[in-house]
Amino acid sequence: MEKSRLHFSSQDASPSLTKSKDWDALSRWSEYLKPDVSSTPTSKGWKHVSFEQSLTSGSFQKAVHIEWVIQLSQVAEGLMAKMYRLIQILDHPDLVSYTFTESFWKAGVFPNCPRICLPVSKKFPDHPNKLQLERVDKVAFDALNDSAETYLQNLEPWILLLLDLMAFREQALRLILDLSSTVITLLPHQNSLILHAFMDLFCSFVRVNLVSEKIPRKMILQMYNLLHTMLRNGRDCEFYHRLVQFVDSYDPPLKGLQEDLNFVSPRIGEVLEAVGPIIFLSTDTKKLRNEGFLSPFHPRYPDILTNSAHPMRAQDLANVTSYREWVLLGYLVCPDELLRVTSIDISMVVLKENLIMALFRDEYMLLHEEYQLYVLPKILESKRLAKSGRNKQKEADLEYNVAKQVEKMICEVHEQALVSCYAIHHERRVLLKQEIGRMVVFFADQPSLLAPNIQMVFSALALAQYEIIWYFQHVGIALSKYKAVRMVPVDIDAADPTIGFLLDGIDKLCCLVRKYVAAIKGYALSYLSSCAGRIRFLLGTPGMVALDLDTNLRGLFQQIVHCLENIPKPQGENISSVTCDLSSFRELWLSVLMIVTSSRSSINIRHLEKATVSTGKEGLLSEGNGAYNWSRCVDELDFLLSKHGSLKKLYFYHQHLTAVFRNTMFGPEGRPQHCCAWLGIASCFPECASTIVPDEVNKIGRDAVVYVESLIESIMGGLEGLINILDSEGGFGSLENQLLPEQAANRAKQTVKVSTPLKSPKAIAGLLLPGHESHLENNNSIKMLEAALQRLTNLCSVLNDMEPICVLNHVFVLREVRFS
């Protein structure tokens, strides 16, 4: 934990809050923004404006807002990392039933005085002084008095966390409200860049508050204030009543979230409706296969190799994981949007294939229970109101029917999910296994077509990444079908071979992209060069001239064209040596977007589209957004590859990983070449560590090393098992059996007695004639030997060719392990 931000003086043992003018300043988040977020690819393209400027300017500039959005999303990750650490320290407390383990009380966060701590938490928001705690446990109360200073210091980091959560709520809500009210369009095909930044903050805000329900907020606040009053002669700490109001308004968090986000509910509903078609497409495996969305071949013209049929849809499919999260969280905190007619199908298709909602790392909530507890009552209330007004207006009749359908959907979809969710995802994994397998073979044979289809590769990686993570999130989960009446285990096949194929496919696709990075970079540079001419042409069209752009906007467009016209020209084999930073171009384009999407601007996005789309070509905004996306393939390709293809989140399920590996690797459909992928994912585990939590990098690194060693032990055990099979009496040993002299004499006699020489001699009872293995009814043993020998050969070849695996400062070389 960083150095405390609560300051104690010799006269006053209470913490002094930061000045009110700093309370809202982003400078308070310096702890959460280390290392400097401006160096990360996520925020590299956003215009950087200092926090001091943003706070003293009086009216916020839109670019400042987006910078703030990006950084608050980073703050949310840090807040959740702190809460996750506290949950681990306290041994995952059950705050519903108030049952705490012995580790909870020995963790050093709270005094080991259950008879004092539990009443102040249960009686919240009553003031601790009203509870007459000295009568509850006089000995424990006196012990608290004696060591109040020590206990107060133990609670100090966590009361700071509550203060940070309260400040985050205020600042995030202000930003969400401002963007929602001033950005004129938040549709993915028009304003996807700002849309993703806005929805990322929205979802981060929701997840932070849902995770906060898992930490003992009431006990932290009440015990801290109790200890403070002991030290300050009954005086409350100055922030106590504000925190009481904050915690009480978010108890439970979903109640507070639904109230706070009610003002943005219509905008969220519009966004969720807009992403619905892409979600439907991602769930339609037949359409994905038949129309070639994940195939390098044209679906209707096999002679055309590049997949030019669906370039935009391929890009949208790469974002479908985010869209699913938007739907699940959006309708949860904005339940009124479910009353849109189209929302029923969108929500149902996502709810039917999910049982839990991942909040942070391996912390999750039971999705359908939350919908039944917090969404269904809102729908029933809307249904009741609509029913009472049916005789007065026709619209009420429609509202009543829609509410009735939503009620039915929420009540029935849980049962449907329990029955069918695994089958849905298994079918999708089979599709991805086939499509990615074909993709790897095709691009290895035709690497020149990898660059034009890079968006399709990202889509395949993102879909496979989602399916693998979904599988391990649901392994070992037991759900209550009817509010904890009975437990229903999720039917997950731990021996599903598709996992190994997908891991291997992701690994090979990423290797191909890294191998041909120069070709992808060259293609992107060529695209940007041609895009410069198209943008210059569009700026000179009569429609644009008639718009009479102001000096600022015109200057931004001229700078954009200048950036694109001056990028390096790819020349032959020198592409790999070209260094090109296009972050300045992306800053300029985002500045343009922030101006033309603002309701306060005289020239907006609709004016630009009308002025340039009449040319019969792509509009100005489409060209700019395309250039933005391709520019990232020049200097942020590694980041994009990590975003869509990284499996670092599997660290939090590494125990399940080991079990599934053992069940599938040496099964009937296991493949030795999958070893590389299973082992390789460990190298990205340390990326999960948060800099805000001390020693987390070392802990995750140690776990990753243990995971690799465990898998190597299993691989070596499998190698030894294959050798033993071949060396056993049922293996090659059975082929080396020789006849005893007595057996040979008996067989010779039997042969002489055969009346027809053309007929094969009959075997003596108990003795098999030479060559009996060749008969069809007897060749199972030969097939087994051939399969074992083939698998042993492949495994040895894979281990010999496998690249070294690096996990922090450990390097594993499998060929050395094999021969050691």
Image (tube, helix red, strand yellow):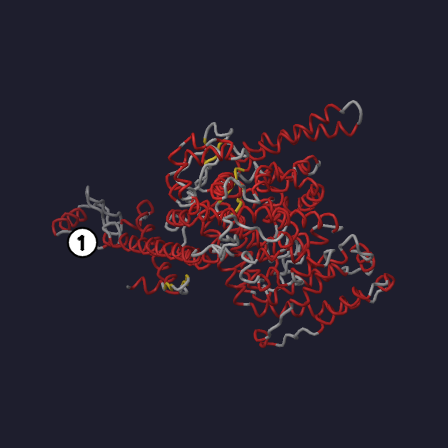
Quick one: 380 or 301, which is closer to the camera?
380
Left of 820 or right of it: where is 546?
right
Q: Position of residue 3 (x, y in %)?
A: 49, 57
Q: Where is residue 339 in the image (x, y as percent from the top left)?
A: 69, 34
Quick one: 788 or 817, which is closer to the camera?
817
Q: Where is residue 428 in the image (x, y as percent from the top left)?
A: 54, 46
Left of 697 or right of it: where is 449?
right
The image quadrant of residue 640 is bottom right
Q: Position of residue 288 (x, y in %)?
A: 61, 48
Left of 53 or right of it: where is 794?
left
Image: 639 above or below 137: below
The image quadrant of residue 456 is bottom right
Is residue 289 at least partly visible in the picture?
no
Is residue 577 at least partly visible in the picture?
yes
Amino acid at dot 1? Gln
Q: Which residue is drawn at 57% across and 50% down?
A: 17
Image: 446 above or below 257: below
Quick one: 286 or 185, which is closer to the camera?
185
- Determine whether the residue tagged by mark 1 lies in a helix, strand or loop: loop
Q: Quadrant of the C terminus?
A: bottom left
The image quadrant of residue 375 is top right
Total marks in image:
1
Q: Which residue is drawn at 81% across and 66% down?
A: 551
Label 1 packing within 10 angstroms: few (<14), some (14-19), many (20+): few
Name the residue beneath numbered marker 1: 738
